């Protein structure tokens, strides 16, 4: 329903645009440019596309993934040095941003074994494969979950399906006693940290998380190395950090600056946090089958059966006991963000920020370093333009974040440290985590950047067909679907904490996610053997950055706010009516959106006319852009969300129950998840106030032009 409404509104706007002059339509495609600057920019973009050196991407990816490089390790420091060297040679000013984080750099010591009816140690590491030389690297680790508690427990087993909130609630309804048991749950449906949170909440003594072949194994097709699906030894690693804020668990809302630095930061004691206390380990399905195949309890309900060749049971019975042991020390660990800058020639204090993390669970060929390699190549391509005297008018920052895999830590700390500067200077944040991990293009975006995403995709050729990237993306649809930004990566702090318009995009495909097999061999065999997507995504990314960097007026699609908000609120009302059929809707919000729609249309025309006149001074342009940068901040509410005040955006947040999904209008989504109507009037007021503030800012800006 939401998507249909959004599309209908988009089509209505397109119809209006079609009635206007050709110059108006042209202006829509070239938001923010005068006729003369457009001609100049067209030449620059053509030059940039030709500057992209496609083989460079392969070189960078191969170098970045030579060794496993977990955050806080010497191998990861070498990756940081390599990136800094590449960016400096490209002409960027490179800065390191160090932080001391409370975390682990390895899984410590751990084991899982059957104790009764007989003893059997279970495998915790991927097999060495003759076909993949990387699989024998001696520095590869067993499977582990960062921020696991430490402990040594022996107990009986309870199967919890995917370990979602609903799954645990259903176990209780079925009379299954979880207290003191070891829970085994499969990956999928929610963030692994919530599986641990719910297991601990219901009294479990420990948790085993495994990859089920029904979700990511032989039931999906051939397994690695014969195919690209999980084999029976492949293990998904990952953090289980589940605080109600992002970043270092000991420094909520404040940057975890170095302990030996001049500025001292107050840190919580670990006991004051919500860090997990029970031991948690990931297993491959080749090990999990030894447990699940021996369970003797009640048969699972419909939908809980997995892909192992056994009837799945809710309990293992008294005869089946398992020992789970984890000793995972945590301490303060130095991490470093590596940020390079091409200083703007005209508006240096307006920033376009591009980013991807560089730390990985092992080699990280798809996740994250396909994105890292692309950004390194992009720094060289833009560097060539700078050397030719064609540097960007606004500053372009390319950031490589550390410790994302431990809990989106490096970027969150940087956002907290740079909060004031980001409020004043950040035009947009573009995220490319695993950005070239396949051949299937897609993107998620905040409203004001959606037009930019699609327009730049029209200018890039898709390498495996005779279509543009845009046409390949949309397929047989009238227009492609642009997703909503969810959780799980480095856009969170920018978008959900300080209100910087953001997007996340690239190309996806086969992945051996968070396993030791996510290597260069896997990439060149299954992901993109021809190595054409790296340069393609670099062209699209660079065009977006340069288009924003060189426009006189920031090319935000301000009218998209009203279009998207209408759809989102219609969707929310529909959900609420499922548990409150008498709910009449959000009257104040609707009034505010109506005003916003009119004001945004007025601003769009005012900017077009001002650009067409060619009479705006540099000072006037700076003031307009200053006010445009402030628009997204209308959704930043200092009170924040009831599920965590760190999440300050009223527009979007991470789903606090799944950890990955996008919650648009999170204040309402939280009430919907609780089937509650108690605070709906409050949210009508808070949302209408934010939207009215946005509409008012737009009107004042229009009147000033």
Image (spheres, rainbow, N blue to C red):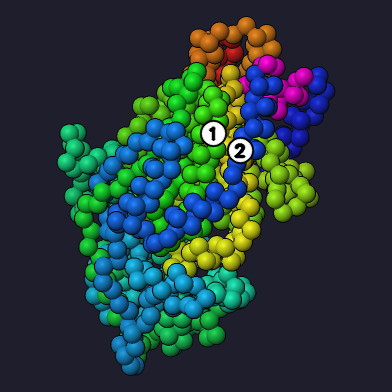
Q: Which residue is most to the right?
A: 19
Q: CA distance from mark 2 to mark 1?
A: 7 Å
- Mark 2 falls on what kind of element? helix
Instruction: Assess whether mark 1 and mark 2 are in contact (beta carbons under 8 angstroms).
Output: yes
Residue 20 seen by the camera: no
Instruction: Judge from the rendering whether residue 179 lies leftward or rightward of residue 483; answer left or right.
Output: left
Q: How many marks?
A: 2
Residue at 65 percent of width and 18 percent of height:
37
User: Percent from the top left, x then y, of residue 704?
Assistant: 56, 9
Q: What residue is shown with label 1?
A: 384
Residue at 41 percent of width and 83 percent of height:
291
Q: Earlier in the sequence, mark 2 or mark 1?
A: 2
Nearer the observer, 646 or 380: 380
**Magenta part mainly helix, strand or loop?**
helix
Q: Start and end of the magenta stretch?
A: 23-36
Nearer the observer, 493 or 63: 63
Q: Is residue 28 above or below residue 356?
A: above
Nearer the observer, 319 or 71: 71
Let me know if residue 596 is in the magenta part: no
User: Percent from the top left, x then y, of residue 227?
Assistant: 60, 73
Q: Dot 2: few (<14), some (14–19), or many (≥20) neighbours within 10 Å?
A: some
Instruction: Judge from the rendering whether residue 27 lies leftward or rightward of residue 182; answer left or right.
Output: right
Q: What residue is shown with label 2?
A: 51
Rendered image: mark on residue 466:
none
User: Percent from the top left, x then y, of residue 64?
Assistant: 44, 54
């Amino acid at each position: 329903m939401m998507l249909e409404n959004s599309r209908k509104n988009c089509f209505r706007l397109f119809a209006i645009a079609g009635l206007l002059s050709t110059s108006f339509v042209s202006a829509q495609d070239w938001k923010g440019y005068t006729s003369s600057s457009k001609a100049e920019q067209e030449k620059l973009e053509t030059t940039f596309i030709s500057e992209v050196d496609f083989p460079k991407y392969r070189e960078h990816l191969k170098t970045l993934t030579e060794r496993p490089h977990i955050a806080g390790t010497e191998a990861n420091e070498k990756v940081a040095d390599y990136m800094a060297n590449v960016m400096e040679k490209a002409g960027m000013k490179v800065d390191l941003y160090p932080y001391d984080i409370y975390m682990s750099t390895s899984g410590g010591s751990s084991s899982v074994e059957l104790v009764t009816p007989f003893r059997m140690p279970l495998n915790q590491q991927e097999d060495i494969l003759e076909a993949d030389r990387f699989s024998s690297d001696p520095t590869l680790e067993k499977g582990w979950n960062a921020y696991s508690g430490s402990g040594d427990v022996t107990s009986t087993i309870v199967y919890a399906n995917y370990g979602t909130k609903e799954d645990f609630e259903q176990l209780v309804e079925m009379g299954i006693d979880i207290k003191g048991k070891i829970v085994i749950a499969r990956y999928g449906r929610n963030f692994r940290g919530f599986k641990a949170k719910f297991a601990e909440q219901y009294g479990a003594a420990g948790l085993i998380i495994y990859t089920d072949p029904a979700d990511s194994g032989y039931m999906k097709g051939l397994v690695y190395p014969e195919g690209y699906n999980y084999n029976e030894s492949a293990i998904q690693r990952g953090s289980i950090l589940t605080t109600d804020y992002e970043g270092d668990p000991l420094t909520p809302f404040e940057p975890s600056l170095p302990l030996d630095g001049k500025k001292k930061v107050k840190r919580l004691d670990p006991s004051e946090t919500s860090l997990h206390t029970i031991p948690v380990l990931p297993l491959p399905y080749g090990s999990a089958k030894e447990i699940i195949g021996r369970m003797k309890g009640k048969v699972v309900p419909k939908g809980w059966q997995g892909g192992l060749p056994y009837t799945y049971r809710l309990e293992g019975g008294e005869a089946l006991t398992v020992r789970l042991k984890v000793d995972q020390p945590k301490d303060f660990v130095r991490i470093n963000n590596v940020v390079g800058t091409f200083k703007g020639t005209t508006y240096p204090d307006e920033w376009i920020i591009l980013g991807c993390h560089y730390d990985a669970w092992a080699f990280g060929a798809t996740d994250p370093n396909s994105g890292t390699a692309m950004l390194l190549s992009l720094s060289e391509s833009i560097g060539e333009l700078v050397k030719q005297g064609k540097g960007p008018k606004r500053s372009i920052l390319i950031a490589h974040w550390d410790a994302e895999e431990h809990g989106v830590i490096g970027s969150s700390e940087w956002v907290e440290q740079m909060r004031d500067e980001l409020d004043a200077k950040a035009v947009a944040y573009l995220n490319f985590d695993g950005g070239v991990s396949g051949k299937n293009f897609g993107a998620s975006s905040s409203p004001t950047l959606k037009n930019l995403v699609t327009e730049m995709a029209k200018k890039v050729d898709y390498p495996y067909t005779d279509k543009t990237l845009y046409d390949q993306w949309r397929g047989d649809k009238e227009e492609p679907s642009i997703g909503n930004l969810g959780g799980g990566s480095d856009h969170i702090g920018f978008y959900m904490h300080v209100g910087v318009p953001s997007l996340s995009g690239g190309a996806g495909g086969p992945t051996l996610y968070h396993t030791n097999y996510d290597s260069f061999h896997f990439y060149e065999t299954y992901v993109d053997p021809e190595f054409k997507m790296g340069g393609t995504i670099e062209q699209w990314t660079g065009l977006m950055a340069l288009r924003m960097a060189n426009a006189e007026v920031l090319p935000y699609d301000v009218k998209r706010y009203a279009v998207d908000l209408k759809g989102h609120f219609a969707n929310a009302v529909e959900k609420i009516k499922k548990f409150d059929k008498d709910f009449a809707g959000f009257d104040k919000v609707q009034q505010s959106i109506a005003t916003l729609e009119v004001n945004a249309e007025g601003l769009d025309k005012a900017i077009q006319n001002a650009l067409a006149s060619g009479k705006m001074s540099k000072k006037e342009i700076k003031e307009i852009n200053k006010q445009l940068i402030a628009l997204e901040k209308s959704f930043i509410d200092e009170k924040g969300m009831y599920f965590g005040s760190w999440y300050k955006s009223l527009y979007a947040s991470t789903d606090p129950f799944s950890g990955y999904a996008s919650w648009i209008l999170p204040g309402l989504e939280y009430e919907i998840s609780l089937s509650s109507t108690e605070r709906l009037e409050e949210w009508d007021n808070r949302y209408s106030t934010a939207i009215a503030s946005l509409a008012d800012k737009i009107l004042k800006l229009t009147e000033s032009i």
